[in-house]
Structures are given as C-alpha cells and as structure tokens.
Image (cartoon, helix red, strand yellow):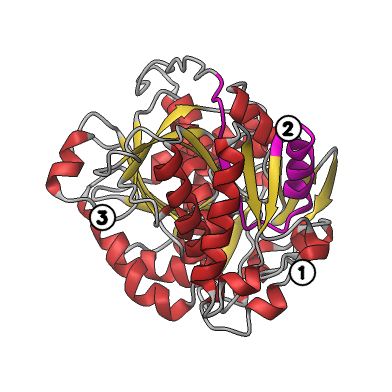
Amino acid sequence: MQNLLLSYYGDDLTGSTDVMEALELGGVPTVLFMRKPDAGLLARFAHCRAVGLAGTSRSESPQWMDTHLKDAFTWLKSLEAEICHYKVCSTFDSSPVIGSIGRAAEIGRAVFGQGCVPLVVGAPQLRRYTAFGHLFAAYQDRYYRIDRHPVMSRHPATPMDESDLLVHLSRQTDLKSDLLDLATLRSPNRAAAFDRLAAGAALLLVDIDSPESQALAGKEIWRARKPGGYFVVGSSGIEYALLAEWAQPAAPGEGVRFPPPGAADRIAVVSGSCSPTTERQIRHAMGDGFDGIEVDPVELVSEQSDQAIARATAAGKASLEAGRSVILYTALGPAADRGAEIDRQEGARQKLGRGLGELLRALTVEQALKRVIIAGGDTSSHALGQLGVDALTVRMPLPASPGSPLCVAHSGIAAVDGLEVALKGGQVGTDRYFSAIRDGLGG
C-alpha cells in the first residue's frame, strides 16, 4: 500500500472502530484488519489511506505486550504511513498489570527509534477533555474529573483513581514525561515550546479542551512527523486533531456519503458489559420488542461452558424464529457484576468474550442474520474473533453515538461476509441504541 496517511493499533475492538469512524467521516478511506493480513487480503483494500489492526491489549498484561505489540508495531511500521497511532480508550483506564499504556508506549518508542512520543487523550467529539494534564469525561448530562466519574472511577478491572494523566502513567513506566498545557498550546511560541519539551521528555501529553485546541495539537503532531513513520499514543482525539490539519488545501478526500441501511427484521445482541449505560439500553430494548436472555457468566467460563452456550443458543434461536430480536447478556448493570467470581480463573474474561462470540456465530449462521451487535469493549475484541471476520469497513457512522459505527464484515465465510456489525463500548450510546440499530436509524 502506498501513500498511507495513518496506520494504527487499537487496544480493543470498539476503540479500533472508533478510529475508523473518525477517519471515514473525514473522507479518509479506512480498513480495519482483525489480524495481520496476507498480501492478497491487503491488496483488496489498496485504495485505503488508513489501515488499522484490531487488538486486545487493553485487557492484556505487560508480558503479553512485550511479544504481541512488538510484532504488531513492527508490521505497522513496515507500511510506512506518515503517522502510526497506538489507540487507547479516551477514559485512559489502565493499570501497571492490565492494559498498561506506559508499557505500550515503551515498546512503540523502541520499535520506531523515536525520542519523544506525543500523547493526546482529549476528544471533544466524545465529550472527553484534558486541561493542565487532568482528564474530564461526561456521564449523561454532567461532566466529571475522571477519578470522580460515576462509572470509570469504579471500573471493575481498571478503576481510574487519578485524574492527572502523567501521575497515572508514572505508575506504568519510568519514561520521563511532560505536558504541553492549554495556555502554552494557545500561545504564539507553541511550536518552539513543543520542540523544547519533546527534546527533554520521552512522553509529551498535549492538552485538548475544544475543537480549537484540538486543531492546534494536530498541527504540531503533523509538523513534527519524521520519515519512516511517527509514533503517537492516544484516543481517537489523534484522528480528529489530524483531520483538522488535513482539511487544509491539501485535503485527503471529500466527505463520504453513507446511505441509511434501513431496518432489519430481527437482530441479535450479545453483551458482556456491566455498565449502567448498557443496562439502560438493554431495559429500553426489552420494552421495545427485544427478548432478553440472561447468560450466567460464571458458567460461561467454567468447564460447563459448552452446555451454557448450547442453552443460550437454543433460547436465542426460539426468539429469532418467532420473529423477535434478542439480547443475550451476562449482567444487567453494575449491581449484577460477577467479576470477582470470574477473575478467580486466569484468562476468564477473555474466555467470556470468546463464549459470547461462539453464541453469536451460531445464531448468525443458523438464522441467516444480516445485522448483529456486540456490547462491551473487552467483550467485542474477543467475541468478534469467533465469527471468522477478516476485516471491517464502515457502513454508517452513528451521529447520536459517536465511536460505535455500524460496520460491514469481510470474511471468507459466506454466512459472515457482508454481515453488518455494531461494536459498542460500555459507556457508549443513547438509551435506544439497540432499537435504533435494529431500525436503521443511528444510535
């Protein structure tokens, strides 16, 4: 592939589609691969100007990263895109032992032989903001410092107890870090300050609190790029920042039009999310024509997982054959979270995602479904791997729920090729998200 603007690795699947949506909305044709593609698959998407690789590092250990991320970054570097992005969640939830952003930055910095790695987390499009190094995020109609956020401060795997992102990172890496704050970013000596700070730090966090500061950040990152690829870390705020810069006279392309997909007669949803946002969405859907089927998460990761999957498949099949859409969920909100029980078994959360994927694959193939949804960031990464999907492209962005587009699956399996798939993080979407996807209206 030639003339690539950007390559990226997504630390989970919903984050990977978030980037793809941002780029497509900016007129940059993008493909997301589920694994390193062979030459033939890569050639099918030669027209794309951005290439993504979906990963699972958000739920993995630093030891896992040492092997898998090094290989992934080495392949992405070989594509010679102008920018290579390690995509993390805009809530920055991570820890020294799970999803370590610090360790990922160390690996990418070494692969690219780069002195300083820019870090961008703020993304106003997703209602995420950084100001003087602190992260703020919206929940419903209010804004919270991330360590006081009603959900992310209590995340079951990686609770955010520190809003100062450089302090949070210092627990994960010994790399020296610094901050290009809002006041300096908006000053006339912005470029000189960026260069001075980058010369003395291995990680440089750039504040973003608005579209205006986002555009300034994109300008500096694009200016600082070097031949052979420039490695950056952050949320999809990276793409939105760069799109502001690319939208100057040398724009990468016209905006893409996305015809509405129309309603689906029935869809299947699998959810491994414990989020109160997903809970509201499930409850709304069950009052709007969906059947809800509870799946025991402890049984799903046990030695009896085959029986659990078989029972859930039979229940889902009955609903679909009756002409009703179905949601199969492992928790109905945080009160039903059984993570403490699940985590007694090593690798159980990955197994949970794979189990939901097996369940969804069976329903998709047997019922010839045309549209499905996977809810939960960690769940999505492991579940989609069971469907035999090779790559995803955007079918339709969802303006009401940015970061969770409806995608098209590309696969060598006939029953999966062309399947429309929406991948939703726990905090994403309005209450009627599942119903809106079924009805083809946007979430």
In the displayed orientation, state which residue is furthest to the left.
Answer: 39
Nearest the camera: 342 or 183? 342
Q: Which residue is mark 2?
A: 432
At x 79%, y 52%, the residue is: 276
**Foreground tag (1 vs 3):** 3
| 3D distance between C-alphas at marks 1 and 3 | 35 Å
Region in magenta: 263-290
Q: Is residue 378 magenta?
A: no
Question: Quadrant of the image for the C terminus?
Answer: top right
Q: Position of residue 248 (x, y in %)?
A: 43, 20
Q: Amino acid at mark 1?
A: Asp
268 up-or-down from 353: above or below:
above
Circle 2 residues within 10 Å: few <14, some 14–19, many ≥20: some
Q: Amino acid at mark 3?
A: Lys
Comes first in the chain, label 1 or label 3: 3
Question: Does the image show residue 110?
Answer: no
At x 33%, y 75%, the residue is: 67
Q: Image check: 114 left or right of 303?
A: left
413 up-or-down from 441: above or below:
below
Comes first in the chain, label 1 or label 2: 1
Label number found at residue 161? 1
Q: Image check: 69 left or right of 168?
A: left
Circle 1 residues within 10 Å: few <14, some 14–19, many ≥20: some
Q: Position of residue 226 (x, y in %)?
A: 30, 48
Question: Does the image show residue 101?
Answer: yes
Q: Position of residue 421 (x, y in %)?
A: 47, 38
| 3D distance between C-alphas at marks 3 and 2 | 35 Å
Q: Which residue is mark 3?
A: 36
Q: Is residue 277 magenta?
A: yes
Q: Amino acid at mark 2?
A: Arg
Q: Position of residue 420 (x, y in %)?
A: 45, 33
Comes first in the chain, label 3 or label 2: 3
